[in-house]
Image: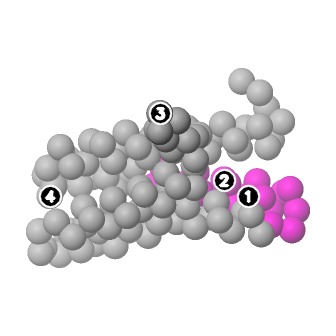
Amino acid sequence: MSDQPLKYKSNLKLRCYTFGLNVINLIDTLPNKRSSWVIADQLVRSATSIGANLIEAKASSSRLEFKRFHEISLKSANEAKYWLELLKDSKLSDSNKIDPLLKEVTEIGNMIASGVLKLKGKNF
C-alpha cells in the first residue's frame, strides 16, 4: 500500500488521465459567462490532449513519430498551463482550485520534457 503514491508519481499516463478529469471538474464550476466558455473550451482541449498524444505515441510506427507525439504532448501541457494561469489571473476561478492543477501540469510537463530530451539523445 505504501508503494501506491510512488507508482502514481511515476505513472505518467495515469497522471495525465487524472489531470484531464480534474480539469473537466474545474470547468464545471466556472461561471456561466462567455469568457469562461472560451477559456474552458481551450483548456479542456489542451488538458485532455496531453494524455491522448501519449497514448497515440504507443501506436507509432517509428522512433521519430514516437518522439513527435511526445513533443505535441509537451506543447499541450504548456498550453494547458497558460489557460489555467489565465483563469486564475482573471479571477474566473478560485486560485485554491487552480494552484494544484498548475502544480500537476508543471510536473507532468517536466516529466514529458525529460523524456523528449532522452529521445533526442540529449542528457542534461
Local SS, label 2: helix
- Region rendered in magenta: 60-79
Local SS, label 1: helix
**In the shown orientation, is residue 37 left or right of residue 93?**
right
**In the shown orientation, is residue 62 left or right of residue 97?**
right
Residue ID at (33%, 59%): 22
What residue is shown with label 3?
A: 2
Question: What residue type is disc 1 on?
Answer: Arg
Q: Earlier in the sequence, mark 3 or mark 4?
A: 3
Question: What residue type is disc 3 on?
Answer: Ser
Q: Are marks 3 and 1 in contact (CB under 8 Å)?
A: no
| Disc number for residue 71 | 2
Local SS, label 4: loop
Question: What residue type is disc 4 on?
Answer: Leu
Q: Mark 1: few, some, or many residues within 10 Å (few <14, many ≥20)?
A: some
Q: Quadrant of the C terminus?
A: top right
Image spot of residue 39 (x, y percent): 29, 66
Q: Mark 2: few, some, or many residues within 10 Å (few <14, many ≥20)?
A: many
Residue ID at (11%, 68%): 31
Is residue 99 something one can see in this rendering? Answer: yes
Question: What residue type is disc 2 on?
Answer: Glu
| Disc number for residue 95 | none
Local SS, label 3: loop
- How far is disc 4 from disc 1 in space, using C-alphas? 34 Å
Give the camera-side residue of 110 and 11: 11
Q: Earlier in the sequence, mark 4 or mark 2?
A: 2
What residue is shown with label 4?
A: 92
| Disc number for residue 68 | 1
Residue 29 lies in what quarter of the image? bottom left
